[in-house]
Amino acid sequence: MSSLTLAATGDSLITMGVAQSRAPGFQRLVDLIRGHDVAFTNLEVSLHEFRGTPQAASKGIYAIGHPRLIEDLKTMGFNLFSVANNHMMDWGEGGLFATMETLDRAGVVYAGAGHHLEAARSPRYLDTAAGRVALIAVTSTMPPHAPAGEQRPDCQGRPGVNPLRYSETFTVDPAAFEHIVRANRELGLDRRREFLMKLGVEHPDPPGVATAFERRFRAGDEPRVDTEPHPGDLAGNLKWVRDARRQADWVLVSVHAHELLSTAGYDVPADFIPAFCRAAVDAGADLIIGHGPHRLRGVEVYRGKPILYSLGNFIYQPETIRLHPADYYAALRVAPGGTPADTVEARGQLDPVLWESAVATCRFGARGVEDLRLHPVTLGFGLPRTQRGTPALAEPADGRTIVERIAALSPTVRVEWQGEGFGSVHW
């Protein structure tokens, strides 16, 4: 087995062609990606001609692009994709199946969704001259209809994405706890829950915990939010990580997660995310690639294995989606008869940090990851909407700022700006 090189990006929400871009730094970025054995991105958009139906619950926009856009991503060098995210089921089963057909015709390897739960969870393999690479892809952020369902001998499973659900418990001071429980009781919401428990679809709370307003609360001295990965989703995914460890030379795990540690801010992941990532490393993962919050998060190295909590947006073109369902216009309060351009104005200006990201490159050798670099990327914030969202390697001043922001979010490793235009990660 020889060494393997990898380039990894965050979210590719692609709705316009990018491969012919003349943006400064774009071609250098493409050359960087093409120069690696494996190039990964999260496909944050379904690719089809409006197959299926727009679902009642979508986490924001209904992300969709033309099937030919997969060729742009291939031209840029990508050969490994995650499809486990909160937008893959925006157009229901029809949209998922059409996207899978698009990817199959393109001959690319993708993981994270399927016709039933085990198909969505199971690894996919990319065979390279350097060796075999496995990918398991999960998402914790998704609308209620999106998770794939398990098959039974007597009943088919449900198509969808590979879920990493989680529980959430809010700790409040004793007086607030009593107030919340009393208000829940006085509004009669506890009687609804009691009825569901009689039906067997709800279960009693553990000692010291009370469910109120469909949230779990407990009394304590310090307000906080505790999250834990769903035991079934954790065990089911770790089973496939262990299997991939025996079937491949290198194992990658993709984690799509918006959830934040509320007491620390949006740039810090909720507790269940590091818990899952470290468990995946314990099970045999060589690298965790995070994305989802549309912004950069920090880097951790656990037992010698890097965890990239979010690489941010790689391609970000939500403003040029060709058609939107009525639900989206209603959510933005756009008047009847509005157009796609009206929805862009209704959303307003997006945060500048959404237009900055990084490409992670690494070399795997006998000791695991032997070199890890972060190449800062800008997406043209401030340009016309037909131009922004296309990535390019950042100019030195912007690049250094981006790398230093990642460094500040990575207290357990050392991230250093290098004059060649990237950040090197040391542990």
Image (tube, rainbow, N blue to C red):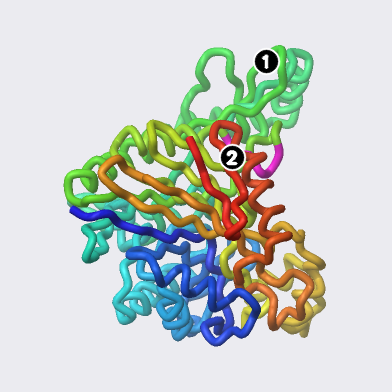
State the residue at coordinates (24%, 40%): 242
Q: Callout 2: few (<14), some (14-19), or many (20+) C-alpha neighbours within 10 Å?
A: many
**Residue at (45% x, 59% y) in the render:** 8
Q: Nearer the viewer, residue 266 or 194?
A: 266
| 14 sits left or right of 220 in the view | left
Question: The residue tagged with tag 2: helix, strand or loop?
Answer: strand
Seen in the picture, residue 180 relative to 157 is either above or below; the reply is above
For the residues marked 2 and 1, what is the alpha-carbon distance in whole angstroms? 24 Å
Vertically, is 397 above or below 96? above
In primary-sequence order, the first of circles 2 and 1 is 1
Determine which of the numbered discs, if any, sits on residue 283 in the image: none
**The quarter of the displayed image where residue 376 is located:** bottom right
Q: Return the x and y of residue 329 as percentages of the image width and height.
A: 72, 73
Residue in front for this viewpoint, 300 or 104: 300
> Quadrant of residue 181 in the image?
top right
Where is residue 250 shown, x and y percent of the image? Answer: 27, 50
Q: In the image, is residue 103 part of the stretch drawn in magenta?
A: no
Q: Is residue 171 visible?
A: yes
Rendered residue at 25%/60% (across/down):
125
Note whether residue 323 is visible.
Answer: no
Closer to us: 316 or 197: 316
Disc 2: which residue: 269
Dot 2 amino acid type: Pro
Three-letter amino acid code at the position of disc 1? Ala
The residue at which mark 1 appears reads as: 219
- Identify whether 328 is placed above or below 282: below
Magenta stretch, residue numbers: 265-270
